Image (cartoon, rainbow, N blue to C red):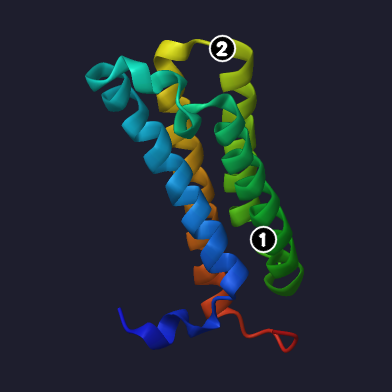
Amino acid sequence: MSKSKYKQLLPAEKLGVFFSLLCAIHCLTLPFVLFAAPYLASSFAFSPTIEWILVLISFGLALLLLWQDYLKHHKPMPLYFLGFGILIKLVDTLVGMKSIEWIFGLSLGIFITLAYWFNYKHKVACTCKNQ
C-alpha cells in the first residue's frame, strides 16, 4: 500500500490504532511472559493500572474519532465494533478469570483495530462534502 493512502489519517487516528494494537500485543504476550518469568507478573508493565490506562486511552480515542467520522459518513459499522470491544471488556471484568483474560484482551484489541480499519475504509470511500 502506498503512503498516500494513509495521508488522510489524522495523527490522533494513528495514535488510536497504535494503542489498540499495543493493547492486543500486551495481552497476547502476557501468558508467555508469565510462563517464562513469573517474577515479572507483578512488574509495572503488566499491572492492572497499565492495563486500564491502555484500555481507557484506546476506548476514549476510538469513541471520539469514530463518532466524529460517523457524523460525516453515517456508517455505523465502526461503532458496532467499538461496542463489541466494550462488551468484551465488561465480560472480562465480570468473569475475572486471570487464566483466560489474555483472550479477552486480544479480542478487545482486535475489535478496536477493526473499528478503525472499517472507519478508514468508509472515510476513503466517503463522497461527503464536509470531510
Considering only order in the chain, which callout, 2 or 1, is on the residue closer to the N terminus? 1
Identity, as a three-letter code, of the amino acid under mark 2: Gly
Q: Which quadrant of the structure image shows residue 126?
A: bottom right
Residue 26 % position (x, y): 41, 38
In-front residue for pair 121/51: 51
Q: How many angstroms separate mark 1 from mark 2 (CA)? A: 29 Å
Q: Which mark is residue 10?
A: none
Against 7, residue 57 (above or below) is: above
Q: Which mark is residue 96?
A: 2
Q: Of helix, strand and loop, which one carries label 2? A: loop
Against 86, residue 32 (above or below) is: above
The reply, left or right, for residue 30 in relation to residue 65 is: left
Labels in figure, total: 2
The residue depicted at 56 percent of the width and 70 percent of the height is 122
The residue depicted at 65 percent of the width and 51 percent of the height is 79
The reply, left or right, for residue 99 in relation to residue 130 is: left
Residue 68 % position (x, y): 74, 67
Identity, as a three-letter code, of the amino acid under mark 1: Leu
Residue 63 % position (x, y): 70, 53
The residue that label 1 is drawn on is: 66
Q: Of helix, strand and loop, which one carries label 1? A: helix
The residue depicted at 57 percent of the width and 29 percent of the height is 88
